[in-house]
Amino acid sequence: MKAIVQDGKTGRLAVENLPMPSPPDGFVRVRTAVSLVSAGTERAILAEARESLVRKAGKKPHLVSQVMQSLKKEGVAHTAVKLKAKLAQLHGRRTLGYSSAGTVIESRARGGAVCAGDRVACGGSGYAVHAEYVIVPENLCVRIPDGLSFEKAAFATVGAVAMQGVRRADAQVGECFGVIGLGLLGMLTCDILTAAGLRAFGIDTDEEKVAAARALGHTAFLRDDPHLEDRMMRFTDGRLLDGVITTASSPSNDPALLSCRILRKRGRNVIVGDYKLDFDRETLFSKELDIRMSTSYGPGRYDREFEEKGRTYPHEYVRWTETENMKSVLALIAAGSIRVEEMVAHRFNIDDAADAYTLIARGGAGGRSAVLISYPEEGREPASTIFLGKTGREQKGIGFIGAGRFAQSFLLPQLKTAGVVLKGVANLNPVSARAVAEKFGFEWAAANPGEIIDHDEIDTVFIATRHNLHGELLLKALEKGKCVFLEKPLCIRPDELKEIRAFLSETSRPPVFTVGFNRRFAPASRWIMERIRAADKIVIHHTINAGRLPEGFWLLDPDIGGGRLAGEFCHFIDHAIFFLGRIDSVEAQGFMGHHDDFEDFSVILKGDRGIASLVYTSRGSRNHPKERIEFFADGRILVNEDYRRVRAWPEKRSRSFTSKGFREEIEVFLASAKEGAFPIPVDELLLNCDLIFEVQRRLGNPRPVRIPE
């Protein structure tokens, strides 16, 4: 399929051929008819992409701070890998756009809000992009009223941004509101205010935009009009404005100062645009002004539960979600209250879409700030895979599913240099799938994992998706007879483990598979094992200084990441199993962390070879190493410091290491797959999950011994 793709490093735009996307649960696939380019918003995106790396870093000082912390904590080599991955993400290719309309061709919506064949308006950056086909969460697409064209419906999402600004203003019928910035958002805001029975006073620095607003019947003036404030006073009968909605984008704080100056006492100042929020405190204080932020399309935006999982808020308490705002905008457009046809500057076919952005970058949209892109229906059956001109090799090879940042940092670089045949890569994001295929030398790219699993020329599958898909994809690949490298964890739900066990018990010779527990393959771990292998008993104390994860991070979602226990702690369980062998008892104590997940806990594992105490915490300093593992055996003490250095007593010496085991685990897996052997015994992989689920049960229902007072 055709899509507009931007190079994040140079800002260059091109129409590329991408594989057809496949909708997950809760999403729909839409054949796009029209998508909307908001000239002001997307011009800013173009400008940002062309900025230097130093300037980009200056805008994100928290990322620079993270790099410095990583240098102190993990050293140059590991930090370089992470930094390279982050730069690849910032400079990677991406699709643009966030407002479109089309027809649903496949629905996996849970709530039944939209069905195949429905005409819908779609929203969301990364979802409603400029592409022939898009996959959109069910709460970000709404049915188009009968008789309303795709062109007009494509304004629904941008209109929802304007609508939310008006709602945040608590505007009352008859009030006078200022609108600073008369681009597309400003024009839509003026129309919505007028439709709600208010009077709008528009201000902009561009003469053409002021003229366009006047052509629609709005009162509008230039920012540098020497009589601007006198005109505003006459407009309000000398009372000043009841509210101001600022939709402008500016590097200065002029919109902030102006908005406060033209507001009456206790007026409402709503921030929709992107400008320097440097207000004059004296004006805010003396007028007792109310400053309000407006978040994009409305309640639900940036809430994964709402957008990705299709969950809704109680209608009685949250009347206007982003979905309802989109519906409201469509109703006003259908009634003729929002006159979007008057806001269209140009129309382009998808094949000529790069010209649209050239026009926008040069400021050629004029006072009308909307550009529409259309997608002809002729010959619109896109391929599920995109071949990259490397066909002809008939030998079997490797397929890769889920090529995110971790995979591109630690797994794919090892495969690229391993001398193996890289056949296909699949990623839910079609742009990423093609970019990864080109970067690492795969023959073709796809957006559907089934293309990898079902392909006859693929005999080995690497799976590095989010955790909720691991168990399902592993079983599908094993049933097809593929060897599988599954990035941890094996699975995150007991029912999945039960299915995996059933498959293995019913299969006399299952294909080779392993889980990406790299720490047991780290040179530091192997070096320690050689020195304590003959010990009668081993005592291990493993401290994991995990650090706090940001709000909303996917790992913390129990449905997607499994939480820190299933999603990450499995690494340290495997490390203990590697040294102790069979574990026959487990104890656990802990408490909930900041995200309604167990983030601080202590686990004791006991086996025939000894005991391991594991302390996992999110409350330590980020400047301290993440892991410290102490081994006590036969009069010796060995301390593993983040797999980079091992100190030994009584020798009083240390040894340094550079690898954390990623290269080694892949080398062992590839060799084992050829030999038909398992790199990690299957019993240990299953035991790992058993222990994780048992720890979850014990933390959820602890039975500590109470000491009498």
Image (spheres, rainbow, N blue to C red):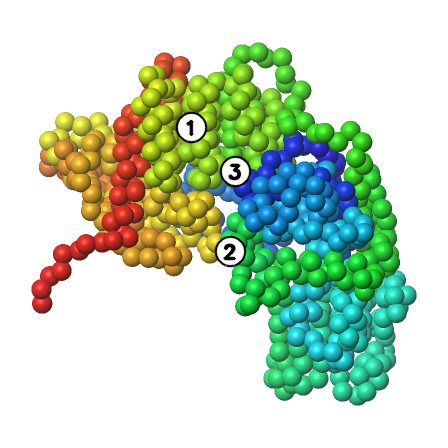
Lower sequence index among marks 2 and 3:
2
Camera-nearest residue between 606 and 544: 606
> Can you name the residue that lies furthest to the left here?
708
Q: CA distance from mark 2 to mark 1?
A: 41 Å
Question: Is 593 placed left or right of 5 in the picture?
Answer: left
Circle 2 residue = 62
The amino acid beneath tag 2 is His
Question: Going 60% across and 66% down the picture, which residue do you hit?
Answer: 319
Question: Is 286 placed left or right of 336 in the picture?
Answer: left
Give the tally of numbered discs: 3
Question: Is 160 placed left or right of 299 in the picture?
Answer: right
The amino acid beneath tag 1 is Leu
Looking at the image, do the residues carrying marks 1 and 3 touch, with CB atoms under 8 Å apart? no
Residue 289 higher or lower than 562, as above or below: below
Q: Residues within 10 Å of mark 2 (few under 14, many from 20)?
A: few
Residue 404 is tagged as: 3
Residue 10 seen in the current view:
no
Q: Residues within 10 Å of mark 1 (few under 14, many from 20)?
A: some
Lower sequence index among marks 2 and 1:
2
Residue 238 seen in the current view:
yes
> Residue 299, located in which quarter of the rendered image?
bottom right
Residue 475 is tagged as: 1
> Residue 491: where, in percent of width, then height?
38, 37
Quadrant in which the C terminus is drawn: bottom left
> Residue 151: where, in percent of width, then height?
80, 49
The amino acid beneath tag 3 is Gly
User: SS of the residue at dot 1?
Assistant: helix
Camera-nearest residue between 226 and 456: 456
Lower sequence index among marks 1 and 3:
3
